[in-house]
Image (cartoon, helix red, strand yellow):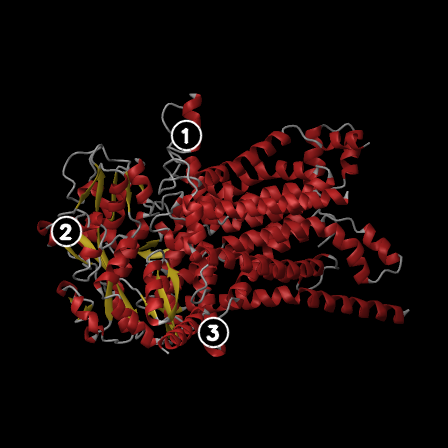
């Protein structure tokens, strides 16, 4: 009798499993995320747990994602915009007030990431990963102070001609404006003139503005970079001579957050996913794959050992205040910054 | 007599109708996926730019167009030529021109060589030209990077041979862009050239030699004029995509110096100025089309009677 | 006779330049293949021989799907583009000049003139409206978009060949009461073969390369290999990409070999 029951249940379970694996899972979820940013293991776990078929599609820039979703007909449910873009998504009415702050796992979110300027109290978005743009230097080539933007703006002779700078307008202008004591989004012409002149002068001492840091910094093609911390950490794992510096004049933080799209076809599954990634173990899976910090308390203990103490990821208290978030500037300011950037690349 | 004329006229009309019918599928697809959208862009170029990309519908402005060539100085607000835009455009034209020249220098002899192989092996050679291109542009560009970087194959080989004492800084320069574009666009020159040379009537070459022409004279006076359509086709296929190159300047040029493709891309991306991007690309298109029409008209004059 | 003609055709130095061209074409490819067996995490440092990236690629279903999707789109786009381009090429060469001919020529080449990003943004706007109206969001959009920009690449070599082709044979066929279709089938088409192959190859390769238009037109779950790689550009490109490229190359080389032997048997 009992054995019969067990076999029947098992058979039924196998049947549902077969149905689930035949792509006709109980539900679907369409994720639109940065390329190479989503841990496939995390997706498998979610699919198994909720019987949902997940499709991940990549984008390569905030503006591409924004343009695409705004045009409509995209079929995505969740998107992962950067902090400075979240207000735009809200203002343009593209994302739904999903109220993650009322979800079960919200208690795990580090209080530091709850009242963020782009989403006060987290009514729209859930933290995915955060990081910062800092300095990486090969200590064999240069032994001086590296906690300064001077490394790429007024480079020491040892480093000149061997510098790579992230090809990101906002990150570069941010550090340079701060270098001259200005505020981000400033329209002060005096500061901006200095910024432009300094960048034009400094650029002649840069080798490249490229993305291939994890490859060329350890290999010695570059001796110094202004780049994202996760990439510099991975460079250090390949070459122990790489040291990380926090520009004391000011450096930008970034955070990408998961948001639910207004025209999502599977909003319920999307909310399940948002809650799912606020679980410490799952958040750790995100970080372990892309090598940036997440915003979830208690995820540290699930992280690989090398990440728990990484000097690139754990911001020392003395530099904490120098960092601030890249906020979204007014359109006129953005236009001015674009002009400076274009002039730099002519 | 008038009956015969009418019949001829009707035949001609019939002919023209079937010509349009024959070209209908190509024109239809191009209309749907290339020209129609272009009108959208033309429309966009006259709009006010949206705050975060896109445009504000129904608000007209010429600013997109004027700022292609003119701009207010950031600091003293004087109106001047958009120096940054113009120098980027000029660099793109120069680089694309030299890319075309280089592909002809390498591509013509190669296509000629292939076309003069025994017939059954020619297609194999054509395949051999295209095989490296079965991998996509990004992979090829990365592969090229492995060759020209400071610790790459080229520098290592030259150092080993003692030709140079320290690595040549090729990568992240305009030379890298030039080499990269030549590499990437070479088959676009070789294939049309091959298609054209393969058809060459070599009895004419023979006749040339019978008249005591040198090899170079035969090449210059007989071969090149006859395969001119192939050279034109190849040049168009290489020059125009080079102008809009986007990936190569980013990877091989180190992203330090923009090309036109990157400049336009930026307006639709972080620059958030779609009308300017639209106006820039339509300007580019008009310039290219005008140049093309002049080029084709001149080139086909003195051709062999077709169009 | 043959050898004499062969001599006459050869030009001094051309063999050498061809040799150089092929060397230059295959050198980066050789580097690519060698590094696919690299044990290290990066493309630039040699960490010993290993086939682990082939295993990684084999297990990475996202990459496989993307690679297969790229091939499917490229095959369809090249097929459609070559057919349409051949018809258009016939219509623009085998005829008396007529009004609208130059215009037609300009139209066919139009996709070449516009930077990809512009077509991409414009297609995004148009196609997303259609997606909303029809509810269809399959691969069709990508195939149409690719076909459009492949047409000029297929058209130009075919047209170039038609232009430099001798008309006498076609006239002879017509004199012998062949219908236009028979003339086309038995005279023009065989002579066009090299150009059609060249055009198809070009279109195929161009479609495989496309990043920007695909990035903007694709719907959910429609990443191709180039858009997948574009997403990786900011992070690290591992030799896994080399491994995939190597497999592609091996397959295409195998195809060429088969083709060669079939051709040889026909001789």
Disc 1 is placed on an element classified as: helix
Label 2 to label 3: alpha-carbon separation: 46 Å
Is residue C43 or residue B77 the one in the foreground? C43
The vertical placement of A261 against C29, above or below, is: below
CB-based contact (under 8 Å), mark 2 and mark 3: no
The lab-note entry on whether marks 2 and 3 share a chain reads: no
Label 1 to label 3: alpha-carbon separation: 51 Å
Residue B286 drawn at (x, y percent)? 51, 58
Q: Looking at the image, which residue sits at the far right?
A: B1
Query: Mark 1 highlights which residue?
Result: B155
Residue A239 drawn at (x, y percent)? 26, 38
Numbered tag placed on residue C131 in the rendering:
3
Q: Looking at the image, which residue sits at the far front?
A: A1
Q: Nearer the viewer, mark 2 or mark 3?
A: 2
Q: Residues within 10 Å of mark 1 (few under 14, many from 20)?
A: many
Query: Mark 2 highlights which residue?
Result: A315
Quadrant (top left, top right, bottom left, bottom right) of the N terminus of chain C: top right
Going 52% across and 35% down the picture, which residue do you hit?
A: C24
């Amino acid at each position: 009798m009992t054995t019969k029951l067990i076999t029947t249940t098992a058979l039924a379970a196998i049947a549902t499993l077969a149905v689930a694996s035949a792509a006709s899972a109980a539900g679907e979820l369409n994720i639109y995320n940065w390329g190479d940013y989503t841990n496939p293991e995390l997706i498998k776990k979610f699919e198994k747990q909720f019987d949902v078929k997940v499709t991940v599609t990549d984008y390569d820039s905030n503006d591409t994602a924004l343009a695409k979703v705004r045009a409509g007909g995209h079929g995505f449910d969740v998107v992962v915009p950067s902090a400075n873009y979240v207000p735009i998504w809200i203002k343009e009415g593209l994302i739904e007030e999903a109220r993650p702050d009322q979800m079960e796992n919200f208690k795990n979110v580090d209080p530091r990431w709850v009242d963020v300027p782009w989403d006060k109290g987290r009514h729209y978005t859930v933290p995915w990963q955060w990081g910062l743009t800092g300095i990486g230097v090969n200590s064999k080539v240069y032994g001086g102070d590296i906690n300064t933007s001077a490394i790429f703006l007024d480079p020491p002779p040892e480093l000149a001609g061997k510098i790579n700078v992230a090809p990101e307008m906002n990150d570069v202008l941010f550090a340079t404006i701060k270098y001259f004591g200005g505020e981000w989004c400033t329209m002060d012409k005096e500061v901006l003139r200095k910024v432009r002149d300094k960048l034009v002068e400094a650029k002649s001492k840069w080798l490249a503005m490229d993305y291939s840091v994890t490859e060329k910094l350890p290999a010695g093609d570059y001796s110094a970079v202004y780049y994202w911390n996760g990439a510099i950490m991975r460079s250090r794992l390949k070459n122990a001579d790489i040291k990380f510096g926090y520009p004391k004049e000011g450096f930008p933080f970034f955070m990408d957050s998961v948001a639910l799209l207004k025209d999502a076809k599977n909003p319920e599954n999307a909310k399940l996913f948002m809650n799912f990634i606020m679980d410490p173990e799952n958040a750790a899976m995100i970080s372990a794959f892309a090598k940036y910090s997440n915003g979830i308390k208690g995820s540290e203990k699930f992280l690989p050992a090398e990440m728990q103490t990484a000097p690139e990821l754990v911001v020392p208290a003395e530099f904490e205040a120098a960092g601030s978030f890249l906020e979204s500037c007014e359109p006129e300011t953005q236009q001015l910054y674009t002009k400076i950037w274009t002039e730099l690349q002519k | 007599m008038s009956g015969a004329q009418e019949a001829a006229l009707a035949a001609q009309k019939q002919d023209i109708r079937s010509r349009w019918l024959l070209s209908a599928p190509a024109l239809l697809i191009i209309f749907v996926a290339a020209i129609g959208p272009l009108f959208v862009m033309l429309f966009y170029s006259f709009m006010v730019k949206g705050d975060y990309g896109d445009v504000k519908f129904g608000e007209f402005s010429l600013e997109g167009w004027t700022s292609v060539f003119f701009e207010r100085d950031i600091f003293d607000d004087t109106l001047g030529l958009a120096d940054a835009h113009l120098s980027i455009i000029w660099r793109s034209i120069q680089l694309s021109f030299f890319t075309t020249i280089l592909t002809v220098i390498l591509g013509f002899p190669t296509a000629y060589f292939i076309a003069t192989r025994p017939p059954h092996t020619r297609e194999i050679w054509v395949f051999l030209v295209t095989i490296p291109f079965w991998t996509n542009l990004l992979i090829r560009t990365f592969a090229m990077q492995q060759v020209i970087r400071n610790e790459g194959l080229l520098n290592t080989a030259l150092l080993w041979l003692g030709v140079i004492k320290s690595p040549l800084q090729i990568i992240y320069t305009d030379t890298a862009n030039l080499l990269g574009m030549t590499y990437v666009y070479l088959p676009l020159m070789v294939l049309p050239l091959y298609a054209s040379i393969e058809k060459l009537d070599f009895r004419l070459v023979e006749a040339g030699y019978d008249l005591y022409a040198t090899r170079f004279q035969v090449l210059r006076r007989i071969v090149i004029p006859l395969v001119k359509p192939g050279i034109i086709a190849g040049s168009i296929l290489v020059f125009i995509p080079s102008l809009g190159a986007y990936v190569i300047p980013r990877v091989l040029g180190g992203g330090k110096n923009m090309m036109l493709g990157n400049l336009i891309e930026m307006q639709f991306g972080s620059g958030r100025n779609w009308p300017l991007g639209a106006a820039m690309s339509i300007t580019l298109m008009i310039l290219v089309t005008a140049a093309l029409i002049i080029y084709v008209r001149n080139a086909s004059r003195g051709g062999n009677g077709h169009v | 006779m043959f050898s004499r003609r062969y001599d006459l055709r050869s030009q001094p130095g051309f063999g050498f330049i061809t040799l150089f061209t092929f060397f230059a074409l295959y050198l980066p490819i050789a580097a690519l293949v060698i590094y696919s067996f690299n044990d290290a995490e990066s493309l630039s440092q040699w960490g010993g021989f290993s086939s682990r990236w082939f295993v990684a690629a084999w297990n990475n279903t996202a990459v496989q799907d993307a690679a297969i999707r790229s091939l499917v789109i490229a095959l369809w786009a090249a097929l459609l583009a070559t057919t349409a381009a051949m018809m258009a090429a016939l219509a623009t060469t085998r005829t008396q000049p007529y009004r609208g001919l130059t215009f037609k020529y300009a139209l066919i080449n139009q996709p070449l003139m516009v930077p990809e990003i512009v077509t991409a943004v414009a297609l995004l706007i148009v196609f997303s409206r259609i997606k909303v109206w029809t509810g269809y969001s399959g691969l069709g959009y990508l195939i149409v978009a690719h076909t459009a920009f492949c047409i000029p690449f297929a058209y130009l070599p075919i047209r170039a060949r038609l232009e430099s082709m001798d008309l006498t044979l076609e006239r002879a066929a017509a004199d012998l009461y062949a219908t236009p279709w028979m003339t086309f089938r038995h005279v023009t088409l065989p002579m066009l073969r090299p150009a059609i192959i060249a055009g198809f190859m070009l279109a195929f390769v161009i479609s495989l390369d496309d990043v920007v238009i695909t990035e903007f037109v694709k719907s959910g779950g429609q990443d191709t290999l180039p858009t997948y790689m574009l997403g990786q550009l900011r992070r690290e490109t591992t030799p896994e990409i080399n491994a995939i490229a190597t497999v592609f190359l091996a397959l295409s080389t195998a195809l060429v070999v088969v083709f060669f032997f079939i051709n040889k048997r026909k001789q």
